[in-house]
Image (tube, rainbow, N blue to C red):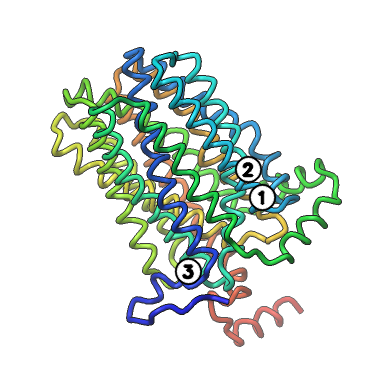
Amino acid sequence: MPSSFSLSRYAHAWRALRHRNFQLFFSGQSISLIGTWMTRVATAWLVYRLTHSAILLGTISFAGQIPTFLLAPFAGVAVDRMDRRVVLIATQVASMVQSLLLAALTLTHRITIHELLALSAVQGIVNAFDMPGRQSFMVQMVDNRDDLSNAIAINSSMVNFARLLGPSLAGIVIAATGEGWCFLIDGVSYIAVVYSLLAMRVDPAHRKAALLRAREPMLTQLADGWNYVRSFVPIRTILLLFAIVSLMGWPFTVLMPIFAAQVLHGDAHTLGFLMGATGVGALASGLSLVFRKSVRGLVRMIPLAAAIFGIGLIAFGLSHQLWLSLLLQLVVGFGMMQGLTSSNTIIQTIVPEDRRGRIMSYYTIAFVGMAPFGSLMAGTLAHLIGAQATVVVSGAACLAGAAWFWLQMPTLRRLLKPIYQQLGILPVVPELIAEEDSAAG
């Protein structure tokens, strides 16, 4: 049963924290994600320090994300057929080992670009299972499905608080001691999330349902998941825009060391400030969604968020001043996270439970799987036309995607309305039902 939770005017904003399992998840992840963001910044800075190459920055990111693109559909089937908590415990332990290996090699000054490529690829394999597992497990951490959208928004806020704090800490640690200690802190931080998962009490019915699904042929389930995504217009449209933004927009992060060092003439501290500013904007976005009471109105936020993201990127690409670049990163972070969380919330709300792992695997492909191609493209373009021009082109592509999605809005609203009515999100008007029945007759 949910634990006691103090009521207030804004209690609905934190209603998901009434649930014990989500409380545990929140506490464990809050610690672990700070370490994760420290590792992301430290890895980018280490690659740039060793190579001073925009192409290799893109290549490392590609190596860390391409396994997710290739394996996510199969991982989604596995998530639907297994105990999701067990899947997450396994991925967290594997991530901990990867970070500790990275720390050992860096602290002993044995790290090379080849080892960074290999360890990034290992983390990509882990992420292929971790992301659909994490997203699918979300519904099991809240006893009341009405609190799912709030749990997703709180989770996004937690991620972005870590995005704010982690890069800033990474900049301090890198400047003081080097990248290796960031990797070590990250490795140790996984203990918190593993403990939180072990302490949860999960309804055995979920495990039994997974065992029943495991009796079906894996290839049949794989085809079923693909056919559902391909034929169901709302999910297909949301994922297509998400893929465009991930391909063209999100890889701007791999170029941040170049902006910090060459465009803004800074150092690791500058990189930390830029990434931290992105985190502040994203955190503001997450908090704005926390205060929403339902998913109503989120569909139109998706193209608006993509447009804000695109405009922010274009302006950032043209900026040469640190103060202006920091302000623009607030805009970029807000648009980026608003689109991500809105898309996630709608998909999680309308997807059927027996296909959740598979559908979220395609969400993972759109979110992470397209990014390796974008990172490789961004690194190559930055080498040819410069990092600033590359980011301007990326922003223009996001704007084009937003315009396309806006044209699909009437169809999406028409298809989502009966689903929202069935879930109780929208009221059912008897007169309209009678008219529809009469027309059908």
Q: Distance between the residues labelled 2 and 1?
A: 6 Å
Which residue is more in the foreground, 179 or 139? 179
Of the image marks 1 and 3, the number of the one nearer the N terminus: 3
Q: How crowded is mark 2: few (under 14 residues within 10 Å), some or many (20 or more)?
A: some
Q: Distance between the residues labelled 3 and 2?
A: 25 Å
Residue 142 location (% of width, % of height): 56, 67
User: Residue 173: which quarter of the image?
Assistant: top left
Q: Residue at x 64, y 53 (%)?
A: 85
Q: Which residue is drawn at 70% across and 55% down?
A: 355
Q: Are marks 3 and 2 in contact (CB under 8 Å)?
A: no
User: Residue 67: which quarter of the image?
Assistant: top right
Is 330 positioned to the left or the right of 179 in the image?
left
Amino acid type, label 3: Ala
Front disc: 3 or 2 = 2
- Element carrying mark 2: helix
Q: How far apart are marks 1 and 3 (CA)?
A: 22 Å
Residue under numbered circle 2: 90
Amino acid type, label 2: Ala
Q: Residues within 10 Å of mark 3 (few under 14, many from 20)?
A: many
- Element carrying mark 1: helix
Q: Which image quarter holds the C terminus?
A: bottom right
Residue under numbered circle 1: 86
Amino acid type, label 1: Val
